[in-house]
Image (cartoon, rainbow, N blue to C red):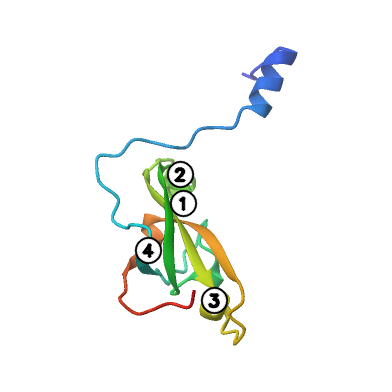
Amino acid sequence: MMNTYSPQGYLDLITTPPNYHRPVDVAPEYQPGDTIITQNLNPLSHTRLPRYARGKKGVIVANYGACVFPDALVAHQQEKPQYVYLVKFSAAELWGETNDNFSVHLSVWSDYIQGKTEEATHG
Protein backbone atom coordinates (compact mmCIF):
# COMPACT_ATOMS: atom_id res chain seq x y z
CA MET A 1 0.00 0.00 0.00
CA MET A 2 1.30 3.40 -0.94
CA ASN A 3 1.52 6.22 1.61
CA THR A 4 -0.46 9.33 0.78
CA TYR A 5 0.33 12.77 2.13
CA SER A 6 -1.40 16.10 2.10
CA PRO A 7 0.61 18.90 0.47
CA GLN A 8 1.66 20.14 3.94
CA GLY A 9 2.46 16.58 5.07
CA TYR A 10 4.67 16.08 2.03
CA LEU A 11 6.42 19.41 2.64
CA ASP A 12 7.02 18.45 6.29
CA LEU A 13 8.38 15.06 5.20
CA ILE A 14 10.98 16.50 2.83
CA THR A 15 11.99 19.50 4.95
CA THR A 16 12.32 17.83 8.36
CA PRO A 17 15.66 16.07 8.63
CA PRO A 18 15.62 12.61 10.22
CA ASN A 19 17.14 12.22 13.66
CA TYR A 20 19.79 9.48 13.76
CA HIS A 21 21.06 10.21 17.29
CA ARG A 22 20.45 7.37 19.77
CA PRO A 23 21.05 6.89 23.50
CA VAL A 24 23.80 4.44 24.50
CA ASP A 25 24.82 3.03 27.88
CA VAL A 26 28.59 3.36 27.44
CA ALA A 27 30.93 6.31 27.80
CA PRO A 28 32.86 7.51 24.75
CA GLU A 29 36.18 5.73 24.32
CA TYR A 30 37.95 8.72 22.77
CA GLN A 31 38.28 12.36 23.79
CA PRO A 32 39.20 15.50 21.85
CA GLY A 33 42.98 15.61 21.46
CA ASP A 34 43.39 11.80 21.28
CA THR A 35 45.44 10.59 18.33
CA ILE A 36 43.79 7.57 16.74
CA ILE A 37 44.38 5.25 13.83
CA THR A 38 41.54 4.12 11.60
CA GLN A 39 40.81 0.55 10.59
CA ASN A 40 42.23 -0.63 7.28
CA LEU A 41 39.09 -2.39 6.14
CA ASN A 42 37.84 -3.46 2.74
CA PRO A 43 34.19 -4.40 3.13
CA LEU A 44 32.17 -5.92 0.32
CA SER A 45 29.33 -3.54 1.07
CA HIS A 46 28.62 0.02 2.17
CA THR A 47 31.01 2.02 4.33
CA ARG A 48 31.33 5.71 5.20
CA LEU A 49 35.08 5.50 5.79
CA PRO A 50 36.75 6.71 2.59
CA ARG A 51 39.49 4.48 1.22
CA TYR A 52 42.03 7.30 1.47
CA ALA A 53 41.44 7.51 5.26
CA ARG A 54 41.82 3.80 6.05
CA GLY A 55 44.79 2.84 8.23
CA LYS A 56 45.60 6.52 8.81
CA LYS A 57 46.36 8.57 11.92
CA GLY A 58 44.19 11.51 12.91
CA VAL A 59 43.25 13.60 15.93
CA ILE A 60 39.82 13.58 17.57
CA VAL A 61 38.40 17.11 17.40
CA ALA A 62 34.87 16.54 18.73
CA ASN A 63 32.34 13.91 19.75
CA TYR A 64 28.99 14.17 17.94
CA GLY A 65 27.29 11.70 20.30
CA ALA A 66 25.94 8.27 19.44
CA CYS A 67 24.25 7.76 16.09
CA VAL A 68 22.93 4.93 13.95
CA PHE A 69 25.81 3.04 12.25
CA PRO A 70 24.96 3.19 8.52
CA ASP A 71 26.97 0.08 7.59
CA ALA A 72 24.88 -2.09 9.94
CA LEU A 73 21.64 -0.44 8.89
CA VAL A 74 22.28 -1.18 5.22
CA ALA A 75 23.69 -4.70 5.68
CA HIS A 76 21.62 -6.06 8.56
CA GLN A 77 18.70 -3.65 8.99
CA GLN A 78 19.95 -2.96 12.54
CA GLU A 79 20.85 0.44 13.95
CA LYS A 80 23.93 -0.52 16.06
CA PRO A 81 24.26 3.00 17.55
CA GLN A 82 27.77 4.16 18.41
CA TYR A 83 29.76 7.33 18.92
CA VAL A 84 30.69 9.43 15.93
CA TYR A 85 33.81 11.58 16.16
CA LEU A 86 35.03 14.50 14.12
CA VAL A 87 38.61 13.52 13.20
CA LYS A 88 41.24 15.81 11.68
CA PHE A 89 43.69 14.23 9.21
CA SER A 90 46.61 16.10 7.69
CA ALA A 91 47.10 16.08 3.93
CA ALA A 92 50.54 14.58 4.50
CA GLU A 93 49.04 11.66 6.44
CA LEU A 94 46.35 10.97 3.85
CA TRP A 95 48.22 11.49 0.60
CA GLY A 96 51.89 11.69 1.47
CA GLU A 97 52.05 15.30 0.42
CA THR A 98 55.10 17.21 1.51
CA ASN A 99 52.96 20.34 1.76
CA ASP A 100 51.25 20.21 5.17
CA ASN A 101 49.24 23.42 4.77
CA PHE A 102 45.79 21.85 4.93
CA SER A 103 43.84 19.13 6.63
CA VAL A 104 40.65 17.13 6.12
CA HIS A 105 37.97 16.62 8.78
CA LEU A 106 35.84 13.46 8.61
CA SER A 107 32.98 12.04 10.65
CA VAL A 108 34.29 8.68 11.89
CA TRP A 109 32.11 6.06 13.62
CA SER A 110 33.66 4.08 16.51
CA ASP A 111 33.81 0.86 14.48
CA TYR A 112 36.15 2.58 12.03
CA ILE A 113 38.71 3.33 14.75
CA GLN A 114 41.40 0.72 15.46
CA GLY A 115 42.55 2.48 18.63
CA LYS A 116 44.67 5.23 20.11
CA THR A 117 48.24 5.75 19.09
CA GLU A 118 50.96 7.62 20.94
CA GLU A 119 52.72 8.61 17.75
CA ALA A 120 52.43 12.24 16.76
CA THR A 121 50.33 12.89 13.71
CA HIS A 122 50.74 15.61 11.11
CA GLY A 123 48.30 18.12 12.00
Q: Which residue is mark 2?
A: 73
The local secondary structure at tag 3 comes to helix
The local secondary structure at tag 2 comes to helix
Tag 4: amino acid: Gly
Tag 2: amino acid: Leu
Q: Nearer the viewer, mark 4 or mark 2?
A: 4
Q: Which residue is mark 3?
A: 94
Tag 1: amino acid: Asp
Depth order, front residue of 83/33: 33
Q: Is residue 20 visible?
A: yes
Mark seen at residue 33: 4
Q: Is residue 5 visible?
A: no
Q: Are marks 2 and 3 in contact (CB under 8 Å)?
A: no
Image: 80 above or below 13: below
Residue for point 34% across, 79% down: 119
Q: Which residue is mark 1?
A: 71
How would you rate the neighbour count of disc 2 (Cα within 10 Å): few for under 14, some for 14-19, many for 20 or more? some
Quadrant into which the N terminus falls:
top right
Q: Nearer the viewer, mark 4 or mark 1?
A: 4
User: Percent position (x, y) of residue 120?
Assistant: 38, 79
Image: 47 above or below 37: above
User: Percent position (x, y) of residue 18?
Assistant: 55, 32
Q: Nearer the viewer, mark 4 or mark 3?
A: 4
Q: Are marks 2 and 1 in contact (CB under 8 Å)?
A: yes
